[in-house]
Image (spheres, rainbow, N blue to C red):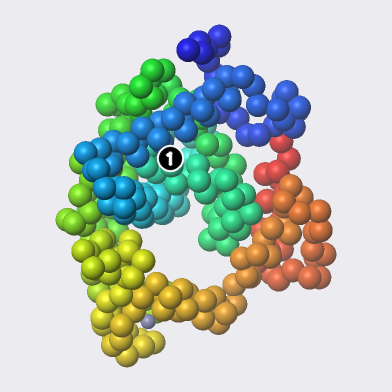
Amino acid sequence: MYKFTSILEKDEKFSKQANKGVPTMNEVVAHLKILFAFKELRAQITTGVSDSAHAEKLWQCYVTVAVRRFNVFINALIDQKHPLKNFELLPPLDVLLVWHSFLLNPRSYYANFTTNLFPEFLSVPFPLHHVQKSIDDTKFVFAPTTDESDKFCVFMESYLVKIGSQERFTYDSYQPFDPSTMSFTITCPVCNSELGTVPLSTDNHTGFADAEFAFKAKRCECSQEMVVDHMELRFRKFTNDVKNTMTLTPVFKYCSPSLTKRELSMSQMDMKVKRLQPLLKQKEKF
Ligand SMILES: [Zn+2]
């Protein structure tokens, strides 16, 4: 078993100066520990399920909930104006799983946070050091201290209370995980009206996390009562983006010299990109 010769003192942005951008041995081992912890998480969620199709479905539902929890986490950071420098919060493992997966697609990650006017989060390194300290070296179980989990729950619940949500934040992400007890409220991507509440998963595969998702949505400002599925939600999101005067998401990558060599000239950019560009460039100088 690998023994750490020295711990990672802190999480740092990918640095061109330090070690010529090549990860250190400890960083690689820390990363592998996290990947093993994700594997262990999946084993825990699907434990006792012998049918592989059922296990796959259970994991799909779990990840769907995890994505939503990551979104709530990001919204809480924006709303609470939480300090991002020396980021000390330790999210639960399912939220870290989504964060880590999202980072594997840097363009999408970059575009998402710039489009949603939260480019500050691009400077927050994935908490590699903090996470690996909470994973044991033999079974790779993620077990942060009570202080760490409590601190995160207090942060999330203060946000949920502020927005009037009845939801309580559970750090251990609903273990044992039972999707049959869960439901999602669906809102219209165009007018934000509530379209209805749907189960996460159903036996006939029509829940929100299912491939054949469909439900009878309430009438909203932009549509009559109708059957809505994933495609209809994507279509409404697309039409909303087309009508919106907001810069189209793929444009933002041209603000980043790390993501593209072809930068837009000032005359090619709209006002929103112009406003963001100096901030983004400053953040890339490390
Ligand atoms: Zn609508």
| Coordinates of residue 74 in the picture (x, y in percent) | 43, 50
Residue at screen point 34% across, 26% down: 141
Q: Residues within 10 Å of mark 1 (few under 14, many from 20)?
A: many
Task: Residue 255: tell me if it is visible.
Answer: yes
How many labels sit on residues? 1
Asked if residue 154 shows in the view, the reply is no
Q: Quadrant of ligand 1?
A: bottom left
Could you say whether the residue bearing mark 1 is in a helix, strand or loop?
helix
Residue 15: which quarter of the image? top right
Please determine whether, in this image, residue 223 is positioned above or below residue 187. Answer: below
Q: Is residue 64 left or right of residue 199?
A: right
Front one among 51 and 262 = 51
Question: Residue 148 vs residue 269: left or right?
Answer: left
The residue positioned 73% from the left and 40% from the top of the image is 285
3 shown above or below 83? above
In the image, 84 versus 223, the foreground residue is 223
Q: Residue lying farthest left? A: 181
Q: Does the numbered disc 1 mark a residue whose Cβ is under 8 Å from ligand 1?
A: no
Q: Position of residue 50 (x, y in %)?
A: 25, 43
> Horizontal placement of 38 versus 112: left or right?
left
Which quadrant is home to the C terminus?
top right
In the image, residue 127 sits, relative to residue 271, either above or below, namely: above
Q: Position of residue 99 (x, y in %)?
A: 48, 44
Residue 115 location, x and y as percent?
57, 62
The residue indicated by pointer 1 is 96
Q: In this picture, is 99 found above or below 71?
A: above
Residue 117 lies left or right of residue 181; in this view the side is: right
Can you tell which quarter of the image residue 244 is in? bottom right
| Residue ID at (33%, 70%) | 212
- Name which quarter of the figure residue 114 lies in: bottom right
